[in-house]
Every structure is written in C-alpha cells, then in structure tokens.
C-alpha cells in the first residue's frame, strides 16, 4: 500500500490518510491522486448513476468490483463491499437485479445472485443467493421475512 496524500483537518487535531487501495469515494475527483487508484472509476460510477439510476445514499467507503452486475434503481449505502473472492476471475462476482437495497457495512462476495426488490440489512455478510422480494440480514446473512 502506498501513501498518496496526507491532509490535516482545519482544527489541526485529526489527520486523514489516503492510501493506494481499492476504494471508491464520491468525492474522489476532488482529491488529488486518488482518481487513478479507485477500484470503481468515476466513469463507472457515473454510468451506474446516469444509465441505471443507482443511488449511493451515503457514498463513503463503497467498494464495488467493476465486474459486478448491478441492476436499475438500486440503493447502496456507506461502507458496502460488492466483489469476488479473488481478483482473477470475473465469474465469481455478485449480480444484483433491479430495485435492490443494500444497507450500511454489508459485504456481498462470491458468485451470488440478489433477486429483484431484495433488501440486505446493515452489517450483513452475504455469501449465497437471495431470492426476490425478501429481506436478509446477519452474519452470515439469513432470511428474515418476505417484503410486502
């Protein structure tokens, strides 16, 4: 990991370190040097927003594999990771259908399929398929109830 930039907050008490890791930040175009080190390029994020109406509700700490398939009208909250178990294979990444909501701090890994209108609760770790119109949560994620 390479240190790209070090900034100090205006009050001088806290520091922020920007490292060359696979991260996506909605404001990455405002931070020098981070743009070339994003796992999600800004072009990919803009494409998701414009063409598929994907909403990044609190867009901090979101990591999405560029090989993942994301449907229309999805909502993704902060600190969500959507990726494969290894960087080498494009076959082991998640597929999200339309109208999926993924709440904060959730992790979706492996070759899984998230059905239409599904909801993934906060802090969930999803490693298997989620049928459509269901709410799943927990670590490991499990069925909670049908979505009405």
Image: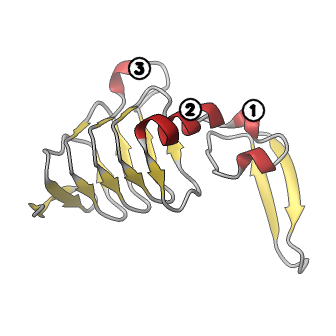
Res 51 label: none
Position of 110 relative to 101 (above/below): above
Q: Residues within 10 Å of mark 3 (few under 14, many from 20)?
A: some
| Closer mark to the observer between disc 2 and disc 1 | 2
Determine which quarter of the picture holds residue 6: bottom right
**Which residue is disc 2 drawn over?**
44
- Quick one: quadrant of the N terminus? top right
Looking at the rendered structure, the secondary structure element under dot 3 is helix
Spot occupied by residue 39 in the image (x, y as percentages of width and height) = 60, 35
Q: Is residue 64 visible?
A: no
**Alpha carbon separation for disc pair 3 and 1:** 21 Å
Spot occupied by residue 84 in the image (x, y as percentages of width and height) = 41, 32
**Alpha carbon separation for disc pair 2 and 1:** 13 Å
* Of the image marks 3 and 1, the number of the one nearer the N terminus: 1
Looking at the rendered structure, the secondary structure element under dot 1 is helix
Spot occupied by residue 78 in the image (x, y as percentages of width and height) = 50, 60
**Alpha carbon separation for disc pair 3 and 2:** 16 Å
Q: Residues within 10 Å of mark 1 (few under 14, many from 20)?
A: few
* Of the image marks 2 and 1, the number of the one nearer the N terminus: 1
Position of 10 relative to 3 (above/below): below
- Quick one: quadrant of the C terminus? bottom left
Determine which quarter of the picture holds residue 4: top right
Which sits in the foreground, 118 or 112?
A: 118
Q: Is residue 83 visible?
A: yes
**Which residue is disc 3 drawn over?**
90
Residue drawn at (18%, 59%) of the image: 135
> Does residue 130 appear to the left or right of 73 in the view shown?
left
Res 36 label: 1
Looking at the rendered structure, the secondary structure element under dot 2 is helix
Residue drawn at (20%, 44%) of the image: 116
Badge 3 vs badge 1, beta-carbon distance below 8 Å: no
Spot occupied by residue 14 in the image (x, y as percentages of width and height) = 82, 74
């Amino acid at each position: 990991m390479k240190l790209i930039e070090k900034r100090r907050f205006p009050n001088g008490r806290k520091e922020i370190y920007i490292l060359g890791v696979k991260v996506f930040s909605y404001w990455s175009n405002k931070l020098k040097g981070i743009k070339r080190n994003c796992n999600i390029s800004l072009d990919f994020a803009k494409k998701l927003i414009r063409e598929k109406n994907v909403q990044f509700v609190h867009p901090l700490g979101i990591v999405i594999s560029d090989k993942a398939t994301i449907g229309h009208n999805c909502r993704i909250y902060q600190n969500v990771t959507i990726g494969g178990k290894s960087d080498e294979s494009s076959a082991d990444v998640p597929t999200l259908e339309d109208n999926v909501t993924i709440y904060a701090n959730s992790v979706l890994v492996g070759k899984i399929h998230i059905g239409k209108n599904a909801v993934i609760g906060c802090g969930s770790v999803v490693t298997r398929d989620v049928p459509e119109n269901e709410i799943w949560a927990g670590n490991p994620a499990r069925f909670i109830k049908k979505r009405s």
